[in-house]
Image (cartoon, grey):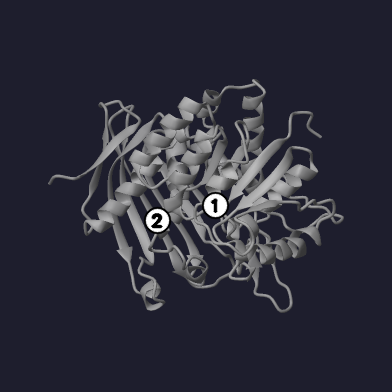
Amino acid sequence: MSTKKKMNVLMVGTGEYTTGYVGGKSADSDKGAGVVALTMFDLRRRGKVDRIAMCGVNGKKFPGIRQHMQTNIGDVYSGMDLTCETFPPDGTVDPQAFRSAVATFGPGDVAIIFTPDDTHFDIATCCAERGMHVMVTKPVVKTLAEHAALAALSAERGVLCCVEVHKRLDPFYADARDRAAALGSFQYLYAYMSQPKHQLDTFGAWAGKSSDISYYLNSHHVDFTEWTLHGKSRPERVTATASTGIAQAKGIDTEDSITLTVQWKNTTDGTIGCAVYTSSWVAPRSDVHSQQRFFYMGAKGEINVDQAHRGCTVAVDGAPFASCNPLFMKYTPTNGTFSGQGCYGVRSFETFLDACSDVNGGVSAVGDYDDGRLATIHTTYMGTAILEAGRRSLDADGRPMDIVYGNEKGSVPTGIVPHQF
């Protein structure tokens, strides 16, 4: 058990990834028990977290959420204290409830934000201004201008601000990133990530309104590329295309699948590499909830990773055949106790909280984490630029968008402009 001061945590967002509660019941996905809340309750059991609060928009959901967490966490794992303050009060609806919640926390406390993409900037700004350390689900914000503003505020307030991109903790992806360093100049990457079409019902409240599938899923492999090529290459041009029809038939005005073609320039020798990122939320049901794979090629070799199939399959009477990924989350208890601490879904949050604790205790400085250990706001500009450029390309009927830098060797994007033919 840690002897460090316990952390106080505010979870902003009450949906699938936080609680596993969607539409009045457990999410029809691989996260029925949630990830964030379960992890925070376990960290409190292990002595790292003290106060836990949760903030949403609709307080009418909280009685159902509490019962859901009792059924899926309290009744499943021993030693879990599910005490959790909630904002806004039960029975009320308040889109600005996060401001009241943040006001009850102080400098050095932690905010974990899992809300619709277009709310990230306002909520993260409110938390950082309060002096709270902030972790925001990908994409951290939707525009390069917002990214720069949040980075400046975080530096001014001396808080750690990070993107929750848990694929960095996936041992397959982490090993691929390290291997890629010996493969020479970047040549080509193809990445695909999908979710089944019934997820459109889960995300119906915001799909096509506050964000799109590229922001939601391409962000994973865009971040992997930025992390892998840090200091070696930079994205310079983005062209986006999309497929449509299935979501629109459900009354949701959004793309079904989005493909980003990104031209990267290797800064060491001036050569060009190409990355193609495709994401979709209209896939059929299959043996996995999310297809996730990529192919990476450097000048001296290549790497293939199929994240969806880890060699573990499960067949149970009355349930579909499944390819499981216990490396992400292990929900099955061991002797009645939650035992998923080694999973990258958990480690993503625990690593961040440990870093915040070290910053609070003077063991480390905020800038120490710009070395790649965490996806900090200061090291993820390129990802935001790619995603915004992709959206702008789609809105311009597929016109390429150029990412602008301060100079020939610059590594921090400063703007996005339509490509001039």
Secondary structure, mark 1, is: helix
Location of residue 147 in the rendering, given as x and y in whole percent from the top left corner: 39, 39
Secondary structure, mark 2, is: helix
In the rendered image, the vertical position of residue 318 relative to residue 275, given as above or below? below
Furthest residue in direction left, as rendered: 421
In the rendered image, the vertical position of residue 25 relative to residue 212, given as above or below? below
In the rendered image, the vertical position of residue 348 relative to residue 267, given as above or below? below
Marker count (numbered): 2
Location of residue 335 in the rendering, given as x and y in whole percent from the top left corner: 87, 55
**Residue at the spot 80% in from the left edge and 56% down from the top edge:** 333
Q: Does residue 168 appear left or right of residue 9 in this picture?
A: left
Nearest the viewer among 339 and 62 is: 62
Q: Which mark is residue 238?
A: none
Furthest residue in direction right, as rendered: 335
For mark 1, what is the residue?
97
Give the mark toward the camera: 2 or 1.
Answer: 1
Q: Place residue 231 in its image quadrant.
A: top left
| Alpha-carbon span between mark 2 and mark 1 | 28 Å
Kind of residue sitting beneath label 1: Ala
In the rendered image, the vertical position of residue 8 relative to residue 276, given as above or below? above
For mark 2, what is the residue?
214
Q: In which quadrant will I find the N terminus?
A: top right
Sort mark 1 into few (<14), some (14-19) or many (20+) by Cα contacts within 10 Å: many
The mark that comes first in sequence, 2 or 1, is 1
Location of residue 98 in the rendering, given as x and y in whole percent from the top left corner: 54, 48
Whether residue 55 can be seen here:
yes
**Residue at the spot 22% in from the left edge and 56% down from the top edge:** 396
